[in-house]
Image: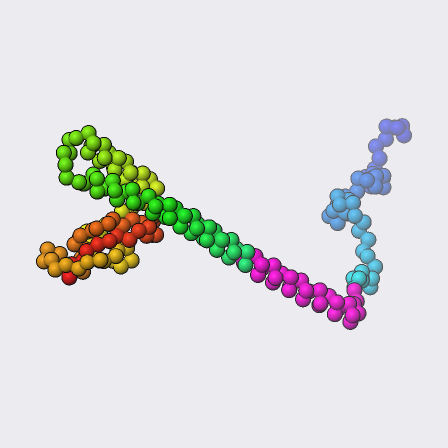
Amino acid sequence: MSEENRQPAPEEMEDTIPEQDLPQTEESEAAEETGEKTEKPPKGKKKKEKGYTFTREQVEQMELAAKQLESVKDQFVRLTAEYENYRKRTAKEKDSLYQDARADTVREFLAVYDNLERAASAEGDDDSPHKRGLVMIFHQYQELLKKLGVEEIEARGMPFDPETMNAVMHVEDENFDENTVAQVFQAGFRMGDKVVRHAIVQVAN
C-alpha cells in the first residue's frame, strides 16, 4: 500500500487535530463574544474619586448667596400675591363704577316712565287712537327697561322692606296684614342686586 493511500492511525489523528477545532470552554466563548480579554485586573489598584475642598470664606459666600436667593424668592411670591389682589380689586371697582353709571342713567329716565304710566292708566276712552298709542309706548318703554336689566320692585301686598321701599304713609286696613304694603305711590326699580330707585309706598298697621 502506498504512502498516499494509507489511512492515518487514530493516534496520529489526535496529534493532527487543528488548534481551531479544539472544543472551547464557556468562559472562552463568552470572552470571544464580548471581545474582552479574560485576564484579571491586578489586585490592589482602585480608582480614586476626585474630591473638592472649600475654604471657610468660600463656604460663607455660598451660604450668603443661598440666603439672598431665598429672600428674592420670598419677595417674588409676595409681589405676585399683591398683584393678583390688585387685579381683582381693580376689576371689582371697574365693574362697580360701570353699574353705578348705568343706574344713574336709568334713574334719569324713570320720570318719563312715571308720566307714561299715569297717562296709560288715566280714565278715558280706551279705544281712542290717542289712548292706544300711549299704552303702546308705555309697553315699549317697559320692554326697553327689561332689556337693560331693570326690573320693577314688587311691593303691593308684600311685607315692607326698608332696603327697597320708602314708607310715607300708614293706614289702618283690615284687608292687609300688619307691616304690609297697602298701596304703591311710585314704583321702585332694581338692576340686579342694586336698587336704582326705592318704591314709595303706604304701609298698613
Q: Which residue occupies 79% across, 48% down?
A: 36
Residue 24 position in % (x across, y down): 76, 45
Give me the residue at 24% from left, 53% from top. 200
Q: Nearer the viewer, residue 104 or 63?
A: 104
Quadrant assignment, res 122 = top left
* Magenta span contains residue 83: no
Q: Residue furthest right?
A: 3
Instruction: Compare residues 99 and 81 and report the one nearer the observer.
Output: 99
Q: Residue at x 83, y 41 (%)?
A: 19
Judged by its main secondary structure, the magenta piece is helix
Give residue 180's position: percent from left, percent from top. Answer: 18, 57
Q: Is residue 58 left or right of 114 when viewed as pictured?
A: right
Magenta part of the protein: which range? 52-81
The answer to whether residue 178 is visible is no
Q: How many marks?
A: 0
Height in image: 5 above or below 139? above
Rendered-image quadrant of the C terminus: bottom left
Q: Magenta stretch containing residue 75, yes or no?
A: yes
Residue 98: x and y in percent read 43, 48
Q: Give the image quarter of residue 66.
A: bottom right
Left or right: residue 43 compared with residue 198: right
Residue at the (31%, 41%) spot, across then down: 145
